[in-house]
Amino acid sequence: MKKIFLVDDDPILLRVYKQKLASGGFDVHTAADGLEAVRTLSTGNPDLVILDLMMPKLSGVDVLKFIRSHPKIAKVPVIVMTNAFMSDQARAVNTLGVARAIVKGDCTPALMLEIICQILGVESSPPGDVESEPETPAIADEATVPEAALPMSPEDILESTRATLSALRAAHQEFFRDDTPAGRAHHLHQLYKQVHHLTSNAALAQCHQVSLLGGAFEAMTYELLDKPQFINPSTIRTIASAVDMLAVLMEDARQTQNPEPLTAQVLIVDDDPLALRIAQVAMGRAKLNSRSTERPLEALDMMSTAQYDLILLDVEMPQMTGFDLCRKLRGIPGYETIPVIYVTSHSHFESRAKSILAGGNDLIAKPVFPIELAVKSVLHILKHRRGTIGLPAEPVA
């Protein structure tokens, strides 16, 4: 029986994946963090390792470095599960050598089983064969293995997220109240941990929209921990909006099975080529299709002949201000309520927020924090499609 070593800090994911892989005929061992993984791998002899990159104590990148430096396991194939919004980590592990890199939000236990069989060159064994294997101990009673052997349905997984959402909201409230650098860093880390678990569970339950927004928000909180200088009124507001929207989407998911993945078209209008490029990259990270122009009048023509789901407007443009362009586009059929995100400078952010946001749109401050723009864009497209255009009543800090 081939031995699989699964490393992830989410207990529900460990349980669901372990059940699926064991049913396919594999001997599955688990670790809940990077440090535990290193300790176990140093004495184990796995045939394959599945490694989440986002873990406490030691990151997945650090664990992979350990594997490649340890003579006994250096050649063991490793599958890494990545966040689609964190391309830097994906590039880092590719230099270390991985058998496969999979976007966690796009993966299912069944797909993982198929990939493992391909890599190891084996066929999945039917459950009946696995039960007869002497290496697999029989389950005596629920007292010895509490719930661990019981299958989890998507409904069970979604129900388990209620506590995670409560913890996420609590961490956000503490983050908003505490304006000390040390306090904010602590509460931001708690935010990151909770959204990490929520996103992981949403992917397991095939909640595509939660997984997309959660993945972007997870990457944003992770980057803010590394770049606290980007914690400002703009990012604080985005955090508040994301927390609220994730709660709404999770409630939707409990009532509607398998919501469709998000597809959308975004129009970017900015006379600065560099700003255009940054926005295009941000849209790409969010899996949103985009078109762009440096000329406001051309943008009006483009909107007259095509339907876009979101408009990104620079405020200061020579031909026409973003405000004037927004007033004109509201007269185009189909654009009466399409969300518009303005791009403005930090110095103007607070003074403009009250007047602009009253109309149901949003702002992002320059210099643009790309992952924040990705979060805002996904957020507003989802809000508009649900008919909830307004933002939370959170004051701008």
Image (spheres, rainbow, N blue to C red):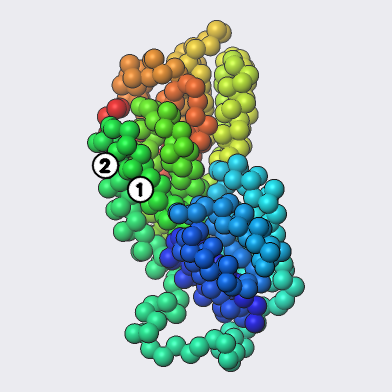
Residue in the image at 33% along x and 53% along y: 165
Q: Is residue 278 left or right of residue 325?
A: right
Determine which quarter of the picture holds residue 26.
bottom right
Horizontal and vertical percent position of residue 181: 33, 33
**Of the pair 330 and 28, the residue shown nearer to us:** 28
Up-down relation of residue 158 to residue 167 (above or below)? below
The span from disc 1 to disc 2 (Cα, nearest Å) is: 10 Å
Q: Which residue is mark 1?
A: 190
Residue 299 in view = no
The local crowd at label 2, few if under 14, some if 14 to 19, many if 20 or more residues have their Cα within 10 Å, is some
Residue in the image at 39% along x and 41% along y: 242
Up-down relation of residue 77 to residue 309 (above or below)? below
Residue 38 in view = yes
**Secondary structure under the numbered disc 2 in the rendered image:** helix
Residues at badges 1 and 2 in contact (C-beta under 8 Å)?
Answer: yes
- The amino acid pointed to by label 1 is Gln
The local crowd at label 1, few if under 14, some if 14 to 19, many if 20 or more residues have their Cα within 10 Å, is many
Which is nearer the N-term, disc 1 or disc 2?
A: 2
Residue in the image at 50% along x and 54% along y: 58
Residue in the image at 62% along x and 54% along y: 65
Q: Is residue 178 left or right of residue 285?
A: left
Horizontal and vertical percent position of residue 238: 39, 34
Q: Which residue is mark 2?
A: 174
